[in-house]
Amino acid sequence: MKKSFLVLVMVIQILALFVFENMRALFTSLEKNEIAAIIAQSDLQAELHMQRSLRRLPGAGRANYFDQVLPMPGAESSRRVIPAGKGQLLLIRKSLDGKSGLLFKKTIQSRQLDALRQLKKILSALIIFLGIFIVACGVYLIVLLKKREPEGGSGTGSIFQDYLVDMKNAQLELQNQVAEQSRSTFQKGELNKSIINTVHLGVIFISASNQIEIFNPAAQKLFNRSLASAKNNSLASVLQGHPGLTAFIQGSEKKNSAEIESGSQIFYVDVVPVADSGRLVLVRDISSERKKEKIERQNANLMMLGEMAAALAHEIRNSLGVILGYSKAMRTEPEKTRKITREINFLSQMMESFLQFARPVEKISRKKTDVGKVIAAAAAAQEMALDLPDGALHLKSDPLLLNVIFSNLVLNAKQAGAKRLRVEFSTAATPSLTLADDGPGIAAAIRDRIWLPFFSTRDKGTGMGLATVKKLVSALNGDIQLLESAGGAKFRIVFYI
């Protein structure tokens, strides 16, 4: 037998031995995974059996999953695998009420597990056989080399060494490829984690067992819950204050999207099922967007109202002018003439105020304005005391419209009997301010009517002050609300820049 052929046979055997060893390692890993799956399934079945026992529900068929279910004194819950003959026995202890419990016994076996173990036996036998054969070939090659040392003997050894070097290089290349794949997988995982943590949408992943596994920073800020308090908990417990949102997510078996209103917030939700792993939920707070749309609708309604009111006021004002002319011609009863004139002037003043209110705000300038200075000027004009915060609030808005807004608010406060005003600023992403007075406040019975044109609690009041304020705040993409207050009136204005 030629030495080169013998070396080639040994190389092929070594390669086969390497392949069989890797296959046996693969089957060993699959066997461990199968055992872990059986243990996890058994633990879940035991937990279900315990829940039914605690709730006194019928558990038909559940206990048949285990070899034995035995009562035991109270003990901590645990899992243990012990040898049992040629197989393994799983022991699961579950505590019912601290004083008693159940012991579940399950033989770890399945068709896949039996098949994997049989394949491992075959591969082990092949590995042993190849090992013995390689040793025999090696001994025989050494004997041949010792019998004669021809001139080309060193060439045979060189060929053998080249095969070994090639094998070593192939092994190193395979190790490098595995390491590179591991690094690539790790980098992709870190990239996905970075994207999830930096995206502005709330990202929630709910596993098939209805437990939260991913709860990114945007979701933590949106629902005011930390990752530690959300992870591995149910969706219902984490989103306790949003039952409508929870019901929509849990009821979406397929890909689904909707706007969900929950309290003062409006959410746009996308639910994407991920095979059998669970559900991916994307949540966005669109409350500010919807409020802006509401303000735009209000402005459109005011414009339509203005067109109708302008025509009506024009006709009324013409008729009042005629009545005023005839009343001045009456000389016999001067007292009645004065009363008629006074009422006509009052109605004319109301019509003029309403015309100004109904006229749309066509031109709005946007300049950097110190809101505190505008409020201070309005308060000084009415000789009202004012408490301003230390910080300033700058808005890119129309200073003339802001002056009209705060002048009306300050005048209303003074006419109601207030002596002092207090202002607070909020410079968050959506700036806002509160303006409170020390007057008698606004009665609960009329809180919803104060924004209506012509509504006034004073005799001969036009009732257009707060209606004008509401209109101008809306024109500046803002919203004004009357807040609950222990004393005096308190208004909050939000500017959606």
Image: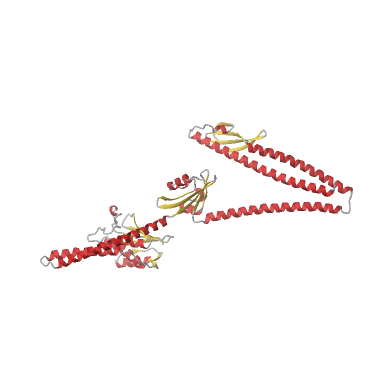
Q: In which quarter of the image is the C terminus?
A: bottom left
132 to 327, vertically: above or below:
above
Q: Can see residue 392?
A: no
Query: Foreground: 98 or 467?
Result: 467
Count of numbered circles on the image: 0
- Percent across and percent down for residue 375 are 34, 65
Q: Quadrant of residue 473?
A: bottom left
Query: Foreground: 201 or 98?
Result: 201
Left/right placement of residue 373 relative to residue 283 reads: left
- Percent across and percent down for residue 182 are 64, 52
Q: Which residue is drawn at 50% across and 34% down?
A: 52
- Percent across and percent down for residue 88 are 64, 36
253 to 486, vertically: above or below:
above
Q: Can see residue 136?
A: yes
Q: Which residue is drawn at 56% across and 54% down?
A: 192
- Percent across and percent down for residue 40 are 58, 40
Left/right placement of residue 142 relative to residue 120 reads: right
Left/right placement of residue 135 relative to residue 420 reads: right
Q: Residue at x 54, y 32 (%)?
A: 61
Report the colour scheme: secondary structure
